[in-house]
Amino acid sequence: MKVSREQMAENRRRILDVASRLFKDKGFDAVSVAEVMKAAGLTHGGFYGHFNSKDDLVAQTLAHSLAADSAGDGDFSAFVRSYLAPRHRDNPANGCPTAGLAAAIRHQTPAAQAAMTEGLRTQIARIEKALPERGSDDKRRAAIGSWAAMVGAVILARAIDDHELSDEILEQTRAWIDTRVS
């Protein structure tokens, strides 16, 4: 039975969404193509109709998830509060792809690294746009510094087994950003 273009596009989107959640939750190496396809409700054999290899899946998943990540649009303070919250920290599978995957990108293909680079550029531009008015050099510096602090804080807060310290990392990073950008 031939699948329509619309169904192919929907299947591809579903594969990318599922792969994004699995990669953010478990890491690239811990997730197999078979696991992605099963979680997407599709057969393993259909994988190669969408992707050339697992490396291709990784790169395209990064591009897809980073493009879909709309963080930074609108109210910057609300974005910071939401990003640096226990709910985000405790839900990596549905959280920020940068915080979930940035550390592992250096072991991936140039295509995956290029997708991360483009996602980072886009996110910095979104944050710059959402920041209160100031000079363009100051705005860019604040956007890069804030984003680096936010991503780093989530990575650190997820990495430790001390819940109080983890919460404190999130709280203090929020407070630090508020004093620098408001």
Image: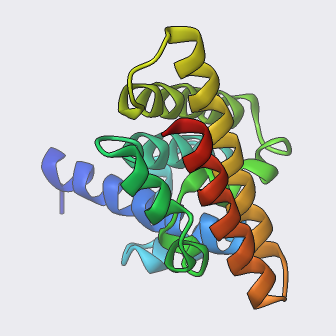
Q: Position of residue 107 (x, y in %)?
A: 85, 45
Q: Residue at x 51, y 61 (%)?
A: 83
Based on the displayed image, in which of its 4 quarters is residue 162 positioned? bottom right
Q: Does residue 170 appear to the left or right of 157 in the view shown?
A: left
User: Where 175 falls versus 73 (above or below)?
Assistant: below
Based on the displayed image, in which of its 4 quarters is residue 73 positioned? top left
Q: Does residue 9 appear to the left or right of 108 in the view shown?
A: left
- Give the colour scheme of this rendering: rainbow
Q: Is residue 116 visible?
A: yes
Q: Going by the picture, which residue comes out furthest to the top? A: 136
Q: Residue at x 84, y 88 (%)?
A: 161
Q: Position of residue 1 (x, y in %)?
A: 18, 63
User: Where 56 falls versus 8 (above or below)?
Assistant: above
Q: Position of residue 88 (x, y in %)?
A: 52, 72
The front one of 64 and 133 is: 133
Q: Residue at x 64, y 30 (%)?
A: 144
Q: Position of residue 146 (x, y in %)?
A: 62, 40
The front one of 155 and 84 is: 84
Based on the displayed image, in which of its 4 quarters is residue 2 positioned? bottom left
Q: Does residue 28 appear to the left or right of 135 in the view shown?
A: right
Q: Is residue 32 visible?
A: no
Count of numbered tags:
0
The front one of 146 and 18 is: 146
